[in-house]
Image: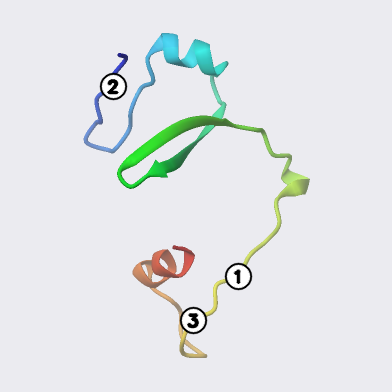
Amino acid sequence: MPSAMVTFNGRITLPNDVRKQLGLKTGDNIEFVEIEKGRFAICPRPAVEPSQVSPFTVSTPEIGRSAGVRELKEAIQ
C-alpha cells in the first residue's frame, strides 16, 4: 500500500504510482472527501475557469467590526 509522510508545513507528496492512477499532472488539484469518520478519499478535482468562480461573503455577528481568522474558519465549516 502506498504511503506518504506529512512535513512540518502539513504537505505531502503523493507517490508516483498514485498520481499515475489518478491521472494527476503538475498543477492539478485534488479534493479530500470524507468517506467515514476519520477516513478520506483523494479525488482529482476538475479545473475551474476563473469565470466560473463566484464571489462569496461571510457575515459576522456584530455589524461594524471585522471578523478574525478563527471566526472566518468557523463560519465556513
| Among the 4 quarters of the image, the one containing residue 69 | bottom left
| Among the 4 quarters of the image, the one containing residue 71 | bottom left
- How far apart are labels 2 and 3 at the CA level? 39 Å
Amino acid carrying mark 2 in the image: Ala
Q: Secondary structure at mark 1?
A: loop
Q: Residues within 10 Å of mark 3 (few under 14, many from 20)?
A: some
The residue at which mark 3 appears reads as: 60
Q: Secondary structure at mark 3?
A: loop
Q: Measuring 52% from the left and 30% from the top, which residue is drawn there?
A: 43
Quarter of the rendering occupied by the C terminus: bottom left
Q: Return the x and y of residue 67 as percentages of the image width and height.
A: 43, 76
* Label 2 close to label 3 by CB (< 8 Å): no
| Sequence-earlier tag: 1 or 2 | 2
In the image: residue 43, left or right of residue 2:
right
Q: From where the camera sits, is residue 14 visible?
A: yes
Q: Measuring 46% from the left and 70% from the top, which residue is drawn there?
A: 75
Closer to the observer: label 1 or label 2? 2
Q: Return the x and y of residue 37 as percentages of the image width and height.
A: 33, 47
- Of residue 32 and residue 36, the one placed in the foreground of this image is 36
Q: Residue furthest front?
A: 36
Q: Return the x and y of residue 66 as percentages of the image width and height.
A: 46, 79
The residue at which mark 1 appears reads as: 57
In the displayed structure, 59 sits above or below 56; it is below
| Sequence-earlier tag: 2 or 3 | 2
In the image: residue 28, left or right of residue 35:
right
Q: Return the x and y of residue 13 as percentages of the image width and height.
A: 36, 22
Residue 4 numbered tag: 2
Q: Residue furthest left?
A: 8
* Label 3 close to label 1 by CB (< 8 Å): no
Q: Measuring 39% from the left and 20% from the top, which residue is drawn there?
A: 14
Amino acid carrying mark 1 in the image: Thr
- How far apart are labels 3 and 1 at the CA level? 10 Å
